[in-house]
Image (cartoon, rainbow, N blue to C red):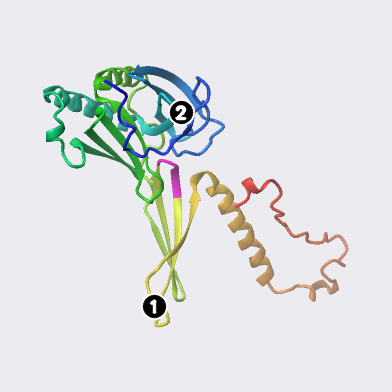
Amino acid sequence: MSDIGSGDEGISSQKYHGQSMDAGGNNFDSGQQPQEQELATKMLQIQSKRFYLDVKQNRRGRFIKVAEIGADGRRSQIFLAMSTAAEFRDHLSSFSDFYSSLGPPNPDNVPDDGKLKSEMMLKDNRRYYLDLKENSRGRFLRVSQTITRGGPRSQVALPAQGMIEFRDALTDLLDDFGTDDGGFKGELPEGRHLRVDNKNFYFDIGQNNRGIYMKVSEMALGPQVKSNFRTAITVPEKCWTRFRDILADYCDKMCRAHQPSDSHQGGAGPAGAAGAAPITPNIDTFAGSAANRI
């Protein structure tokens, strides 16, 4: 059977040059992380396609990158948390059983959309759509990954005959590295609310595949306000301490600024009293690169 799954799928991919994967490149959040490690890799040749299964680890935990390299060198990839990879492995078994129960392809009995069986997986802000499809080239499993907040869809197409081989390779990696995604497992603090004059401030702690964060949102009240629209900022946990220190420094400076001047006491000016050292303000110059600024 000829190579299938790329004729009508519109896979957005780039040319892949060379034989090795880009270790340390794209991660589960598709951003570059210098501290990312590649723990293991497997390569499968299924028909005219190569599939790479890479177990990777960064500060947010472990995940598997699945990359498909077509006969023409085009590359597409998806990212699976370890727990999602385990769920995908189980779906591969059921899809394979269903595929085995099908008779020979019948061009006169193909659904309009080509779908023979579908499932959906949900992980944090990502959705995965599994579609066993049939077209003029044959039968294949299309796995699409989307982000709920918008963004491009990425997908790979696995020839149906290779589902068992792919499942077994995935099982070997999960047996070696487990199904734990890593990351924080404790209970997050409850949200807080602060009202000041005609404004409400909300402090909400959350977690996604990027890590733990604090969302600080503001909502104004009063007859002049036409909607309950909130404006918000998101502060990653890794800079909470620095964020707190900057606020504390401003609080301390404003507290001193509001104190009454004691220049009339002792008959000496602020810098004129014997034995009294002048007060040097603690000025934060935000030295360093822009990446370290808040």
Percent x, y for residue 231? 45, 64
Q: Does residue 191 appear to the left or right of 234 in the view shown?
A: left
Q: Does residue 29 appear to the left or right of 33 in the view shown?
A: left
Q: Quadrant of the N terminus?
A: top left
Residue at 41%, 32% (x, y): give it.
76
Q: Are marks 1 and 2 in contact (CB under 8 Å)?
A: no
Percent x, y for residue 217? 44, 62
The residue where tag 2 is placed is 57
Alpha carbon separation for disc pair 1 and 2: 47 Å
Say if 138 sits above or below 222 in the image.
Answer: above
Residue at 44%, 44% (x, y): give it.
212
Q: Which mark is residue 215?
A: none
Q: Does residue 97 appear to the left or right of 145 in the view shown?
A: left
Residue type at the position of mark 1: Lys
| Magenta residues (range) | 209-213
Q: Considering depth in this image, is 133 or 110 the residue closer to the camera?
A: 110
Residue type at the position of mark 2: Gln
Percent x, y for residue 28? 43, 35
